[in-house]
Image: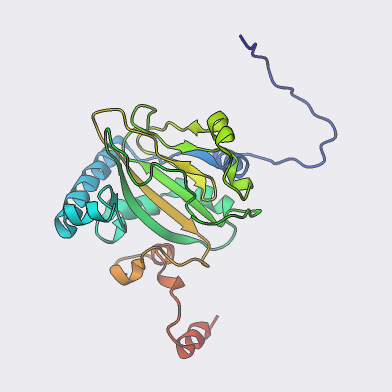
Amino acid sequence: MTATYSAPARSYGVLQQDQSSSPHEDIAEQIRRLGYAILDSGFSDAELAVISGDFNRMRDSYIRKWGEENLRGANELHTIRAAVTHGGPSFLRLIMNPELHAVIRLLIPGKYFLNQQNGIINPPGQTYSQAIWHRDLPYQHFTTSTPLAVNALFCVDDFTAENGSTFVLPASHKSAAFPSETYIRKHALQVEAKAGQYILLDCMTFHGGGFNRTQKERRAVNHVFNIPYFKQQIALPANMSADGLSDAEKEMLGFTFQEPASLDAYLASRIGK
């Protein structure tokens, strides 16, 4: 048996050290170093019940509109794309959660906005599209000194080892290449979280869903926030109205980051800046 002792309380030869004075800074530091962390959303039990009900209604409507067989044929049956454009106010609240942005602002200096928001269902006893290792900036092999994008996976249900909670490869955002099979077997870690928490990832951290061994599906809402140099997965402003949105909400949804359609439109956008 390995004995457990207290870690050293002092150091020498250290000229620089990260400083942390708040829970948000603690979480941001863990993401910088390990690539992942857990964040409490602060939603009440009543609010979580509303989100859960809205998720189910959105899913039923989505399947009625696009057809179960069509979605199955596209390998999209367990994914609900662009939730904020058709799912109701709950999904805007998930995007604009103050606790979430208190952390993201520490990770991404300057402007960032929502790239995508997708409902995710991990079905019982089946594989699904997210149950493979991937980055949320896929097909990219590089590292950066600060995150270009942050993944915020909101847990509608508890994430447990039994229902296929997310696996991560800690610190894999610091290396360009995908790790070896030996490294994966030794270091893959399954992250458990409670309903109402976000699993936050540097988007270059390799991760994937586990196999759901229970009799009940496990639901989540995935978000990717990135610097304004990436296109949205689906152009959200083209699929929803800006009526009733605050300036902060319009910016976060990408209304202020659309590509100018012409040189005239670009120059007009610069006037007064």
Specify whether 143 is left or right of 124.
right
The number of callouts visible is 0
Could you tell me which residue is drawn at 59 percent across and 47 percent down? 173
Left/right placement of residue 2 relative to residue 254 reads right
Return the residue nearer the eye: 252 or 223: 223
Please say whether residue 189 is visible from this viewpoint: yes
Locate residue 122, reporting x and y percent: 31, 39
Coordinates of residue 21 in the picture (x, y in percent): 63, 39
Q: Is residue 92 above or below residue 210?
A: below
- Colouring method of the image: rainbow
Q: Is 188 in front, or is 45?
A: 188
Q: Quadrant of the C terminus?
A: bottom right
What residue is drawn where x is 54% and y is 38%? 169
- Say if residue 243 shows up in the picture: no
Q: Quadrant of residue 26?
A: top right
Q: Quadrant of the N terminus?
A: top right
As drawn, which residue projects farthest toward the right? Answer: 13
Q: Residue at x 46, y 43 (%)?
A: 133
Extreme top residue here?
1
Residue found at the far left of this picture? 64
